[in-house]
Amino acid sequence: MTPQMMGYDRAITVFSPDGRLFQVHYAQEAVRRGATVMGLKSKDGIALLVDKRISTKLLEAESIEKIFKIDDHIGAVASGLVADGRALVDRARVEAQINHITYDEPISIGILAKKISDHIQQLTQYGGMRPYGSALLIAGVDETGQRLFETDPSGALYEYKAVSIGANRNTVMEMLESQYRTDMSLEEAIVLGIKALYKSMEAKGEVPTIEIGVIDVETRKFRKLSESEVKDYISKADIKKPDAESAARPEREE
């Protein structure tokens, strides 16, 4: 970077001469280095999956939370800076409760996703504040059906049938683009997601620590799968795991 560009690099949300906001770009890079997460819509529900990144055996796996319940019918998964993701989840929960109190009805997923993206975008406009270094996948079932949205540190909002964010995104997206079908059952979607997570870690000789959340179309209730349920799905995926020596996990950034 040239000395002339350094001022735009250090200033918060100031456009460079070539039209870039470097701080937003760096926030997006924080997401790309985050945990591998994905969401998949199916004909009977939505699945959210994440690699929890257990960096040491001394860590209590239950203490790492990457999948969150926003409302009874909405779940979210975060990638990037953990604390920023938690702050966005808290904001989403408040917005959902405000809608309950104001209109006496659950918030629609599209409206919630737009409110969160509007909040994220505001932090790209003012000095003295930095963008969120985290992105969310917001999933839920409402009167419009299954909805799956991705927020971005720039404030952009996208809706997907299936999507991945975080580290190894390209590997996962290639597999989803080739094997995902809109008529998949929820079980088939979960199995495909597990296979994609394992494939993304295969080159590194690592075994992902998977957490899964689901929302069923009939009940419209979000819940996290138990450890035994996750193991059952992994067995259905028929994964060939790397040996114990190659599966040793080095310490990595959250």
Image (cartoon, grey):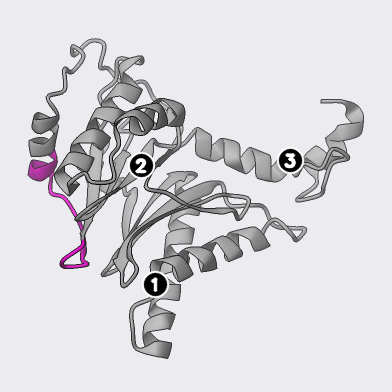
**What is the x, y in percent for residue 220?**
22, 67
Image quadrant assignment for residue 214: bottom left
Residue of label 1: 108
Along the polypeptide, which appears first: circle 2 or circle 3?
Answer: 3
Instruction: Measure the C-alpha gap from mark 2 to mark 1.
Output: 21 Å
The label on residue 22 is 3
The answer to whether residue 144 is left or right of residue 152 is left
Q: Is residue 132 visible?
A: yes
**What is the x, y in percent for residue 126?**
75, 61
Identify the amino acid type marked 3: Phe
Residue drawn at (40%, 88%) of the image? 103
Instruction: Measure the C-alpha gap from mark 2 to mark 3.
Output: 26 Å
Residue of label 2: 38
Residue 29 belongs to magenta span: no
Along the polypeptide, which appears first: circle 2 or circle 1?
Answer: 2
Secondary structure of the residue carrying tag 1 is loop
The label on residue 82 is none
Q: Nearer the viewer, mark 2 or mark 3?
A: 2
Q: Disc 2, disc 1: CB below 8 Å?
A: no
Q: Nearer the viewer, mark 3 or mark 1?
A: 1
Q: Nearer the viewer, residue 133 or 150?
A: 150
Residue drawn at (26%, 11%) of the image? 246
Residue drawn at (43%, 89%) of the image? 102
Identify the amino acid type marked 2: Met
Q: Quadrant of the C terminus?
A: top left
Secondary structure of the residue carrying tag 3 is helix
Q: Disc 3, disc 1: CB below 8 Å?
A: no
Disc 1 residue crowd, few under 14, some 14–19, many 20+, Cα 10 Å = some
